[in-house]
Image (spheres, helix red, strand yellow):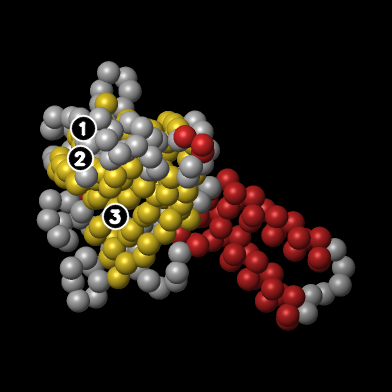
Amino acid sequence: MESRSPLMRACAALVAVGLSVLVLAASPATARADLVIDSFDSTTIAWPVSRNTVGTTPMHDGALGDVMGGYRHLSLALTDAIVPGFDSATVELYAGGGFSFCDYTSRTGADGRVGLAYWGNAEGDMVTDLSGQAAILIDLLGYDSPASVPMTVEVMLVSDWAQPGEQSVTAQVSTTTFGPQTLRVRFDTLPANNVDFSNINYISFIFDAPMGADFRIDEIGTEVPEPATMALLALGLGGLFVRRRR
């Protein structure tokens, strides 16, 4: 076997360090868990929230153990109603009894918008570290819209909220797909250095539904990189290096 040059020895050392880092990152003992933003498992206020005239109805639900920051701030807006009093939009939260979800329904000409925001009970009350997360996932139990008109979801993350160093980033996802699905906002697609992911104080979602659309939200949470994927990447790099040496 040929003796290795200093360059090859340096490369071997770098690969060894890289493999160690990747394997440690893939270890269950050190892996970051997915975070739940809202599972819609609990509520302390009366539902539903309804509108049959143009305007906005806010609702604030607190002391919730399954909600990031402990408070769910919801708003239902009706931007258009062809026949006021007949065309309407309603948000209902079904919690307990073996199932839980947030249900939005609209009738005929109702053009509605649902806002969900999480910041705790007051500005700066919630401090959430999303730096180890890869994406935000919005799990829908269903979506139904006449003529497959898209629904747009706007997601906003704010760090140092209401402070001199406040930063924010906004992303949009949309769907025309009928039925259950998952909408994903990947953090690596967001503008770099626009927000401090280790100090998120405000998270909001605006579901802009077209006229007559219905949808159900099962859960909103985050996603971490797959440990198995990271481990396979480490093994692949190691195999390439061994093959190169031979």
201 or 61: nearer the eye?
61
At x 40% / y 36%, what residue is drawn?
213
Is residue 13 positioned above or below 101 on the image? below
Task: Specify whether 43 is left or right of 33.
Answer: left
Q: Which residue is mark 1?
A: 85
Crowd band around label 1 with a 10 angstrom C-alpha radius: few (<14), some (14–19), many (20+): few
Residue beneath the point at 45% across and 64% down: 190
What amino acid does circle 3 point to? Ile
Which residue corresponds to the image point at 36% horizontal and 65% vertical from the top-left? 169
Kindly report the distance in space between the C-alpha atoms of the residues bearing marks 1 and 2: 7 Å
Instruction: Look at label 1 and name its amino acid.
Output: Gly
First along the sequence among labels 2 and 3: 2
Q: Secondary structure at mark 1?
A: loop
Picture layout, residue 189 above or below residue 151: below
Tell me which corner region of the image, top left, top right, bottom left or bottom right, holds residue 12.
Answer: bottom right
Give the residue pinned by disc 2: 53
Judging by the rendered image, the residue that carries numbered circle 3 is 203
Total marks in image:
3
User: Percent x, y for residue 100?
Assistant: 31, 27
Label 1 vs 3, first from the N-terminus: 1
The answer to whether residue 30 of the structure is visible from this angle is no
Q: Is residue 5 above or below residue 199?
A: below
Quarter occupied by the C terminus: bottom right
| Outermost right residue | 1
Q: Amino acid at mark 2?
A: Thr
Can residue 239 be seen here? The reply is yes
**For the view shown, which residue lies furthest in the bottom direction?**
6
Task: Mark 2: give few (<14), some (14-19) or many (20+) Cα within 10 Å.
Answer: many
Number of the front mark, 1 or 3:
1
